[in-house]
Amino acid sequence: MNKLLACGKLSSRAPHRVLSLFSSFDMSRSVHSIPFATLEVEEISGSQPAEGKWTGSSCWNTIVDPLNGEPFIKVAEIDEKGIQPFVESLSRCPKHGLHNPFKDPQRYLLFGDISAKAAHMLSLPKVSDFFTRLIQRVSPKSYQQAHGEVYVTQKFLENFSGDQVRFLASSFGVPGNHLGQQSHGFRWPYGPVALITPFNFPLEIPVLQLMGALYMGNKPLLKVDSKVSIVMDQMMRLLHYCGLPVEDVDFINSDGKTMNKLLLEANPRMTLFTGSSRVADKLAVDLKGRIKLEDAGFDWKILGPDVQEEDYVAWVCDQDAYACSGQKCSAQSILFLHENWTKTSLITKIRALAARRKLEDLTVGPVLTFTTGAILEHITKLLLIPGSKLLFGGEPLENHSIPLVYGALKPTAVYVPLEEIVKDNNYELVTKEIFGPFQIITDYKEEQLPLVLDILEKMHAHLTAAVEVIGKSVNGTTYAGLRARTTGAPQNHWFGPAGDPRGAGIGTPEAIKLVWSCHREIIYDFGPLPKQWEIPPST
Ligand SMILES: NC(=O)c1ccc[n+]([C@@H]2O[C@H](COP(=O)([O-])OP(=O)(O)OC[C@H]3O[C@@H](n4cnc5c(N)ncnc54)[C@H](O)[C@@H]3O)[C@@H](O)[C@H]2O)c1
């Protein structure tokens, strides 16, 4: 039987490492032939809970198995009384960061090496399988979807191997006004930074943002949703195994309120928040704007007049709306069908594809932020709108043991007429993000396209979209064309909202530079002075 660690422990003997929760990294705890792992994915259960050790915290958060309600992970959480060491650790990092183009530039190469090694580890089938199954335990999704997360993370790390990290810090120079003068633009770290991530991508979001923060020379404090933080626990061990200095990252498990307090006291120079718009807006005020956001998405797809490849389009709609039980921030929340599509059997096809989804292979599964009751109540309200109707779903999943604190809903689509969506008293209800296997479907006539655009214009979250009307919309990640989709945030293109100066991005060199570094201009002005220079009249 394994005694499992959900978190490393704080060591009181090594103050400079106190806050690196994995400083107790202990190879003897390794299981299998995976050198860094400290747990067996399938053995975490009610009778053998994974246990976190967190010296200095007596506060335990028991996480229940989303599939059967058994308490299966005990996470040691820091409460408000325990935040001081984290505040002090962040304050030890200078504003100019752990490295920058003028300080310890060899660290750019170090992170290129760490990335190469970590990518290699994730490419090993047993390691990739380990993380895939671990993700499935805490954020249930199909094997393929969970594996997608591991694969994207591996590819991202490959992208930033070798010299690619130092290329992120490339500078440029512009000739000056006279001999000896030149201005240079540099990418500069913020120094102490914070990173907060949600439950739905337990590996991909934290790793991509964490590494971006580190690449640019920051010292990040990382907080992942406790429901899923066991995945990053194991990933931190992998990163340490691949050479990440333990003191470079502080990793904390806490509730949102404690983290909020910690942010106010530690005053990080920059915080990247990924999660709901409600928390994002609160933090933007609390942190006086020193924040970048990847918040909620009410993501839409417009099918234009050209009807073609019906089966393919139906399949993409099903994937976009219901894969990961609709718990991707990019999940399709509303589908606008041109009248030409309403004459086809598209909806029948989407219904049939949605009906294939089953709990056994997690192609549909628990909803972690809405209860079944709350979603059904939402559906009931929508059905009170004149002309609206249930297209399919709208019922709880059957024969399951998903605990009541979570949701269990069959993939659902509700039709709401376009003219009703635009009405002020309906708009907010219809465009509320339901983070689950749920979408609105509506249709429009050719001449109603401006109405569709009005609806898009009024939305507050502009994350992803699949669209043919690019010129009149602002979504950050927009897919256009026959094979367009709303979901699928790989490592090879920008993913993030647009139209908001606080908007962050993830994955690409541009995203990393934008989020995790600022511009610094250094103007070299060495002279020489012009011959026979004299003090001029005052100006
Ligand atoms: N834009 C993106 O890239 C993206 C990606 C994934 C999820 N999301 C969004 O995230 C939401 C789902 O996640 P959720 O419901 O878990 O979000 P959430 O906002 O409730 O929680 C996100 C994280 O913030 C923490 N938190 C909560 N309150 C806090 C506070 N006051 N101060 C500091 N931290 C706090 C939570 O513990 C968690 O770690 C959806 O709205 C989804 O669209 C967006």
Image (tube, rainbow, N blue to C red):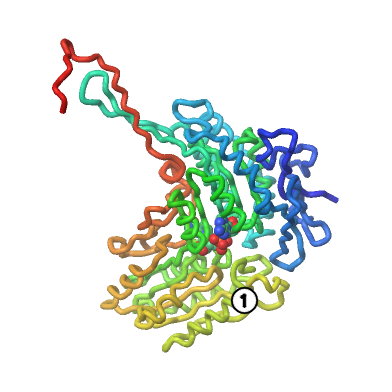
Query: Does 336 appear above or below 137?
Result: below
What residue is drawn where x is 16% and y is 10%?
A: 532
Residue 426 drawn at (x, y percent) = 41, 80
Residue 297 drawn at (x, y percent) = 46, 63
Residue 159 visible in the displayed image: yes
Name the residue that disc number 1 marks.
372
Number of numbered discs overlaid on the protein picture: 1
Q: Amino acid at mark 1?
A: Thr
What residue is drawn where x is 61% and y is 40%?
A: 88
Q: Quadrant of ligand 1?
A: bottom right
Q: Is residue 450 left or right of residue 258?
A: left
Give the residue furthest to the front.
Answer: 538
What residue is drawn where x is 21% and y is 21%?
A: 178
For label 1, the crowd category at 10 Å Cα-Cα, with few meaning under 14, some 14 to 19 and many 20 or more, is many
Q: Is residue 510 left or right of residue 214?
A: left
Give the residue furthest to the left.
Answer: 537
Query: Does 443 appear above or below 470?
Result: below
Q: Is residue 190 left or right of residue 51?
A: left
Residue 67 drawn at (x, y percent) = 71, 67
Query: Does 332 appear above or below 255?
Result: below
Mark 1 residue's CB less than 8 Å from ligand 1:
no
Image quadrant in which you'd find residue 508: top left
**Residue sitting nearer the eye, 69 or 364:** 69
